[in-house]
Image (spheres, rainbow, N blue to C red):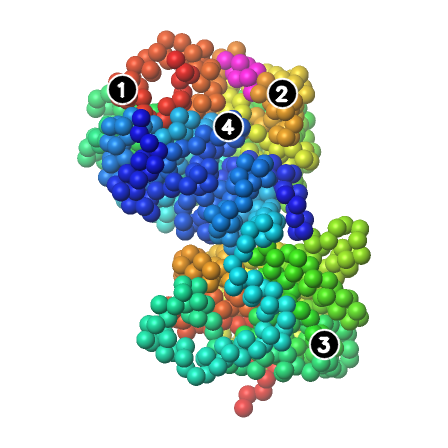
Amino acid sequence: MLEKSQLVNDMKKLLGPEKVISSKLERYTYTYDSSFLSQLNEFYPDVVVCPMNTEDVQIIMRYAYQHNIPVTPRGAGSGQTGGSVAVKGGIVLDLSGWTDIVEIDEKNMQVVVRPGIVHADLNVALSPYGLFFPPDPGSSKMATIGGMVGNNASGLRAVKFGNTGQYVLGLEVVLPNGEVMKTGGLHSRALKSVSGINLTSLYVGSEGTLGVITQVRLKVLPKPPVRGILLTLFSSLDDAAATVLEVFKNGIIPSGIEILDDSGIKAANKFQPDLKLPEAEAALFFEINGSKAAVDFEGQQVKEIAEKRASSVEWATDAQRMAKLWQGRAVIGAASARVKEGATRIFCGEDVCFPMAKVPEALRRIKEIGAKHNTLVVIYGHIGDGNMHTAPIIDPLKPEEVQAAHRVADDIHQLALELEGSTTGEHGVGFTRSQFMEEEHGKALEIMRIIKDAIDPKGIMNPGKIWAER
Amino acid sequence: MKTTYRVDFAEELKKCVRCGECRANCPIFSESKREPDSPRGRLSLVKLLQEGKITPSAELSEKLYGCLLCKTCAVNCPSGVITDEIVMGVRDYLDDVLDRNIIKKLVLRGFLTRPALLQTSFSLVKLYQKTGLNNVLTRSKLIEHLPEQMSAGAKILPDVSKKLARGRIPEVVKPYGEKRFRVAYFLGCATNLIYPDVVVSGVDVLARHGCEVITPAVKCCGMPHLAYGDTDTAVQLAKKNLKILLSAQVDAVVTDCSSCSATLAESYSKLFEPGTDEYNQAKELSNKVYDLSKFLVEKTGVQPGPNPVNVAVTYHDPCHLKRGQNVFKQPRELLKAIPGVEFKEMKEADRCCGSAGSFSIMHHDLSMKVLERKISNIATAKATVVATSCPTCTMQLSYGLKTHGMVAQVVHPVQLLAKTYQTKT
């Protein structure tokens, strides 16, 4: 077994000391992401390295492969499943400083980036070209593209624009043995390709278990010129869910449909008092974008549908008001703690996805689970695709509340499976949901393991994730 | 952790859900891109300390002093974590348990608590500048061989050859016309010593707006001490200033320095136990403290003189004014009221300039990287004058403009307003 000091010294020698973080104090800041479980444990990496080019990553991987050292790729550490936490120690690759945009290919509507670029920064860079990268995680200001690809993230605009995977045309990957592979064609700029087995798709959502993504070619779209947001409030969760279904039935696909429950509305108002959301059981935010004529027409249609059940309806096209509304919804994940003095929200059981038809039942039963365990659960999320985020609000200094929250998370995950949904719609598995994978996937999990073993025979890539310990 | 600076560490720290939103807002993280330099990283280390899992160390201290205290993370935190306050509190704690650099101690406890000594030291700096020794050091590049911090300080320090403000202002200045307010002008250390012209303009403008202005012999507001964890000295200074200012029988305490007003209005009450006399006095003072632009806009109304000031002006928001006191509309309103001024809003006007008191000296290279972005935004605004309401921001911006070969001048908004009363000769 290699001595830790030897590992640190070798990394410094191979990459230069400025790319290596080795003090215990500094390494501690890489032991967590947003997940509650990562904060209850202290998974120290032995060393953190900050590669700035593909060769750096190759050097690290060759070394790790030779010495059987675990390697955990990490972006902003804003994930909620412990995916970027080194549960088996070893090397953490902090890729968040590698933020280059290699190329904006305006005519072919694609962009090539390094993994550390932040989602919001990419869209700022694309804006002058009239382009945008559509998936919009609520964590747009911190999430890196590498992390989004690794988890196949989606977010607030998935209803119309889908998830990250739908935009990844090709990847550069450093394999566990240090070799470099390009997926999607070595020189391809094609927007479509069915040439060969789709390895791009294999890597999207693989959570760093199959190699290190060092470059991403993304399809981007023309930025919709006009946008409007319809804010609607309901006195029952059922009415909110029924409204969403009726909008779809009328052939309208908004870019996003978001929900806040009663506690979420309170939290949003506390975070941004000038939002002034009226009290209600549920708030829905419909975002509609496209040409002016389409936005006006569809906005009016959605408004008429909503008015059948809503207690209040507001159609906003003013840029400032829209930004406030969207931001109010986007940050609710962290802001939901504001509903209860002396408490905080924790991230566990936070990303379940239900079939559309079962959303009303799911919402009701999540409330019941919270009540059963005497835990306030704020519900918010992407009702347009059934992806609900649930936020237990607890005092983490009280062990009984922590225990109750774990039970809430377990029950919510089980509910997702019972209602023919998924334990995770967009955040990934990490180590916080691996115990449910067998039940969710059955035989398919075995095939996933076979693929993993074939690509990473030594099991050094992000060990302890997705699969429960064998 | 027991500290004089009142922060409930356990309650505040548990609010952080480690979402990382602060990474997007922190000017220091923007440059370093390393988690230990992010607000979330610092908070995680404070939590370890608070839980007794680590002991105070020089390395921990270095991480906590790598924060600008610009409040950007705090005002943008969805969970409402007051990271800057927590960092200030821990610095207070570390000050009690770690041996602090002897030079910093001398400066904080020796010079800044004794105005006379401070003035003498600045006379030495004047001598250094008047003899041309600074030029010799700079031209010969000997300056590069001075200890890093001394070299950085010598580069940033502007010309201090002017007579100190205190010597140029009568103890009582009568209002022009009818007296509307009696105002105490809180003369901050940096403005008094480095930018005395601001005080001269400020007092004159207040008098022209119907104020009787007194300039009490106050002590340093205590901000440098708070920033360096020397809270005991800050408490002593606060007590003295509270006594001086509350006995002055004034309607308002006005200052041109955003750090001074933030300290007087916001920080003093955190130094005393609620319910004590000092706490109540701090609250009483807080209600009387005004930033100069805010006072002119909200209390007197801006009454410019007849002479236009034909310049294109942009405004840089000092952190302690915008995020510390929610004052950002008033300086702009004041500038726009000045005849001839063409106001040009710059991009990211409220982004920290990297000065943060002595941060630009103690962490020079990092500070310069933060400054770089600000200078670029000023250049894009195409203004010939940059207005701001903080002497250390003024120093930092002037240095940045000079090193980038830009001719734009940095002034306090009130200096432009004062020009409207001057008759051209």
Residue type, label 1: Pro
Mark 2 vs mark 3: tell me if same chain.
no
- Label number found at residue A404: 2
Can you give x and y, in whole percent of width and height, for residue A262 in the image? 66, 29
Quadrant, the N terminus of chain B: top right
Q: What element carries label 4?
A: loop
Where the C terminus of chain B falls, by quadrant?
bottom right
Q: Residues within 10 Å of mark 2 (few under 14, many from 20)?
A: some
* Disc 1 chain ID: A
* Res B110 → quadrant: bottom right
Q: Position of residue B143 (x, y in %)?
A: 37, 71
* Mark 1 residue crowding within 10 angstroms, few (<14) / some (14–19) / many (20+): some
Badge 2 marks a residue whose secondary structure is helix
Residue B9: x and y in percent read: 63, 42
* Inter-mark Cα distance, 4 to 3: 60 Å
Instruction: Report, in whole angstroms, how far the alpha carbon at label 1 lies from the one at label 2.
Output: 39 Å
Q: Hey, what amino acid is under mark 4?
A: Asn
* SS at badge 3: strand
The answer to whether A333 appears left or right of B173 in the picture is left
Cα–Cα gap, marks 4 and 1: 28 Å
Disc 3: which residue: B213
Q: As drawn, is B115 to the left or to the right of B277?
A: left
Chain designation of label 4: A
Q: What residue type is labelled 3?
A: Val
Where is mark 1, residue-wise?
A457
Q: Which residue does the image show at 47% across and 74% down from the upper left?
A: B158
Dot in front, 4 or 3: 4
Q: Are marks 1 and 3 in contact (CB under 8 Å)?
A: no
Residue positioned most to the left: A187
